[in-house]
Amino acid sequence: MKLGNKIVKILSVDEDTFKIKLKFADGIIGQVDLGFIFSKPKYLPSEIIKGGLFTKCFVESGALAWPNGFELCPDSIRMKLNIKKNAAA
């Protein structure tokens, strides 16, 4: 896997299932399930859930981020990505 991936856009966020659809700089579009982090959250992810901030995510320097300072590495997200072939943005 090539490292140095960057997220360029958040296409959709589902706070009920903790799934986020993303577009990467190389054009790949896919959905990542973040339930493994947010279904039983601790520390910063817990603050996101308690504060109702899951849908407030944004892209910062190519990473997925939240207002409380929590960020996820785009390379790690890319490894868990469910890629949709020929998906339109």
Image: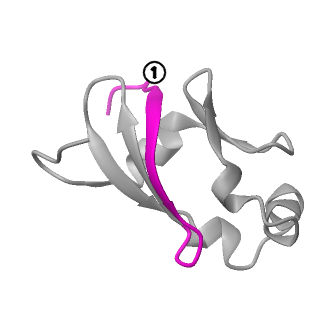
Quarter of the figure with the N terminus: top left
Within the image, what quadrant is residue 78 found in? Answer: top left
| Quadrant housing residue 24 | top left
The answer to whether residue 26 is magenta is no
Query: Circle 1 sits on which residue?
Result: 4
Measured from the top left, where is residue 42 in percent x and y? 85, 68
Q: Element at badge 1?
A: loop
Q: Is residue 40 above or below residue 4?
A: below
Q: Is residue 8 magenta?
A: yes
Residue found farthest to the left:
86
Q: How many residues crowd around disc 1 within 10 Å: few (fewer than 14), some, or many (20 or more)?
A: few
Marker count (numbered)? 1
Horizontal side of 5 relative to 88 (left or right) equals: right
Residue 20 or residue 32, whichever sits in front: 20
Q: Position of residue 73 (x, y in %)?
A: 59, 37
Left or right? Give the position of 23 relative to 39. Answer: left
Residue drawn where x is 12% and y is 49% of the image: 85
Asked whether, in this view, residue 72 is left or right of residue 80, the answer is: right
Q: Looking at the picture, how far across and down is residue 33, in whole percent?
A: 47, 65
Type of amino acid under label 1 = Gly
Q: Quadrant of residue 16?
A: bottom right
Residues drawn in magenta: 1-18
Residue pictured at 79% horizontal, 66% vertical: 52
- Along the line of sight, the residue nearer the viewer: 11 or 81: 11
**Which of the pair 31/4 is nearer the observer?**
31
Question: What residue do we see at 51% from left, 43% from top?
Answer: 76
* Residue 65 at x, y percent in the picture: 68, 40
